[in-house]
C-alpha cells in the first residue's frame, strides 16, 4: 500500500516537473506550424516548385542507390 | 560611286549591317517577349484550372506533399526499394489502424458476454444458497 502511494507521489511529482516543458514544446510547435503554413500560403509557387525539385532529387538518389 | 554610308544595293537588298543587326535584335526581343507572355498566360491558366492557390490555402501541407510525390515519381524513384519500404510501412500502418477498432469491438463484446456469464453464475450460486438456507 505504502509502495503504491510512493509510486503515485513520484509519478505526480515527475508530471508536475515535466508539464511546463511539454506545454512550452506544444506552444513552440504550434508557432512553428503557423509560421510554416503562413509561408506556404504566401509563396505557393515557390514552395510547390521547391517540393517538386526536392522530390525529384530524392527520386534520383533512390534510383541511383537501387 | 558608292559612299561608305550608303547601303549596298548590288543584289537588290538593303545590307546596312547596323540596321540589320538592330532589326534582328528587335525581332528576337519581340519573339522572346511573346514567348514569355504565352508562358505566363499558360501558367496562370493552369493555376486557375487546377485551383492551385485555393488548394494550397485549404491544405498547405497536403499540396506540398503531393508536389514532393510528383517530383519523386518524375525523378524515377517509383520502382526502387525505398518505395517498397514506404508502401510496406503505409500498408502495415493502415492495416493496424483498420484492425484496431474491429479488435476493440470484438474484445468489448467478449468482455460483455463474459461479464454476463459471471453474473448468471453468481445468480445461480446465490439462488442455490438461498434455496439451501430455506430448506434448513
Image: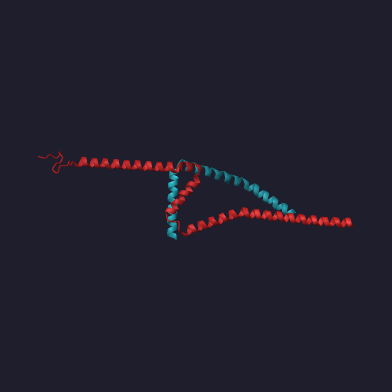
Chain colours: A cyan, B red
Residue B84 or residue A3, whichever sits in front: B84
Q: Residue A52: horizontal and vertical position, in percent?
A: 43, 49
Determine the image quadrant of residue B96: bottom right
Q: Residue A25: horizontal and vertical position, in percent?
A: 57, 46
Q: Residue B43: horizontal and vertical position, in percent?
A: 39, 43
Question: Is B129 situated above or below A48?
Answer: below
Question: In the displayed image of the protein, which residue is found farthest to the left?
Answer: B1
Task: Say whether residue A1 is left or right of residue B8.
Answer: right
Q: Residue at x 47, y 47 (%)?
A: B64
Task: Say whether residue B110 is left or right of residue B95.
Answer: right
Residue B125 or residue A60, whichever sits in front: B125
Residue A17 or residue B25, whichever sits in front: B25
Task: Say whether residue B23 is left or right of residue B69.
Answer: left
Question: Is B130 situated above or below B19?
Answer: below
Determine the image quadrant of residue B51: top left
Q: Residue at x 57, y 56 (%)?
A: B95
Q: Residue at x 67, y 55 (%)?
A: B107
Task: Say whether residue B117 is left or right of residue B48.
Answer: right
Q: Quadrant of the N terminus of chain B?
A: top left
Question: In the displayed image of the protein, which residue is found farthest to the right?
Answer: B136
Q: Residue at x 26, y 42 (%)?
A: B25
Amino acid at each position: 500500500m505504502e509502495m503504491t502511494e510512493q509510486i503515485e507521489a513520484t509519478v505526480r511529482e515527475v508530471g508536475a516537473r515535466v508539464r511546463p516543458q511539454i506545454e512550452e514544446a506544444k506552444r513552440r510547435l504550434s508557432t512553428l506550424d503557423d509560421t510554416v503554413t503562413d509561408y506556404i500560403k504566401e509563396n505557393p509557387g515557390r514552395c510547390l516548385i521547391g517540393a517538386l525539385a526536392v522530390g525529384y532529387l530524392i527520386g534520383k538518389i533512390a534510383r541511383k542507390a537501387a | 560611286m558608292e559612299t561608305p554610308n550608303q547601303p549596298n544595293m548590288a543584289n537588290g537588298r538593303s545590307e546596312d549591317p547596323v540596321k540589320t543587326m538592330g532589326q534582328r535584335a528587335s525581332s528576337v526581343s519581340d519573339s522572346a517577349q511573346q514567348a514569355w507572355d504565352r508562358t505566363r498566360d499558360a501558367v496562370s491558366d493552369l493555376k486557375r484550372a487546377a485551383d492551385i492557390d485555393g488548394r494550397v490555402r485549404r491544405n498547405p501541407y497536403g499540396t506540398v506533399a503531393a508536389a514532393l510525390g510528383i517530383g519523386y515519381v518524375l525523378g524515377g524513384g517509383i520502382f526502387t526499394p525505398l518505395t517498397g519500404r514506404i508502401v510496406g510501412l503505409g500498408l502495415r500502418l493502415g492495416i493496424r489502424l483498420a484492425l484496431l477498432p474491429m479488435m476493440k469491438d470484438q474484445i468489448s463484446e467478449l468482455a460483455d458476454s463474459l461479464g454476463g456469464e459471471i453474473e448468471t453464475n453468481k445468480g445461480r450460486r446465490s439462488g442455490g444458497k438461498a434455496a439451501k438456507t430455506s430448506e434448513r
